[in-house]
Amino acid sequence: MAHDPQRQIAAYFRKGGRLTVKRAWDMFGTTELRRIVSRLRKGGMDIVSRWVSIETRDGRQQRVKEYSRTDYIVCHVKKNYGQNLLNTV
């Protein structure tokens, strides 16, 4: 299979995956995650970003953006919200 990070990342997002720039490098060998996300958004894929904290090699906290599909987050929240309602009854 040819190295096509955009297609691989789109498939990963469709499965509910979340990516940071570092994770995209580790998994797909690309440093162009922001550019790929922009192209996927222009192509109609709903992708959101949020700030997350990670720990650096020297133990400091660093904020980075994490990208994922909108519909996956909504489904995940609804699922968890429903479970919480069941647990409180």
Image (spheres, rainbow, N blue to C red):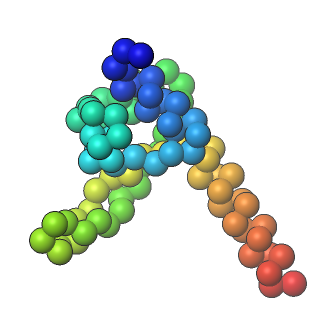
Q: Which residue appears at 50% of the width and 37% of the height? A: 12
**The furthest residue to the front:** 1
Query: In this rendering, is residue 85 above or below 10?
Result: below
Inspect this view and state whether residue 41 appears: no
Q: Which residue appears at 61% of the width and 47% of the height? A: 72
| Quadrant where the C terminus is found in the figure | bottom right
Q: Picture coordinates of residue 64 (x, y %)? A: 28, 56
Q: Is residue 34 left or right of residue 12?
A: left
- Of 58 and 81, nearer the camera is 58
Q: Picture coordinates of residue 21 (x, y %)? A: 28, 44
Inspect this view and state whether residue 47 appears: yes
Number of numbered discs visible in the structure rendering: 0
Q: Which residue appears at 34% of the width and 34% of the height? A: 28
Q: Picture coordinates of residue 7 (x, y %)? A: 45, 23
Query: In this rendering, is residue 89 above or below 53?
Result: below
| Quadrant where the N terminus is found in the figure | top left
Q: Is residue 78 left or right of residue 37?
A: right
Q: Is residue 68 left or right of residue 87?
A: left
Quadrant in the rendering for residue 37: top left
**The furthest residue to the left:** 58
**The furthest residue to the top:** 2
Quadrant in the rendering for residue 5: top left
Q: Picture coordinates of residue 22 (x, y %)? A: 27, 47
Query: In this rendering, is residue 71 above or below 7?
Result: below
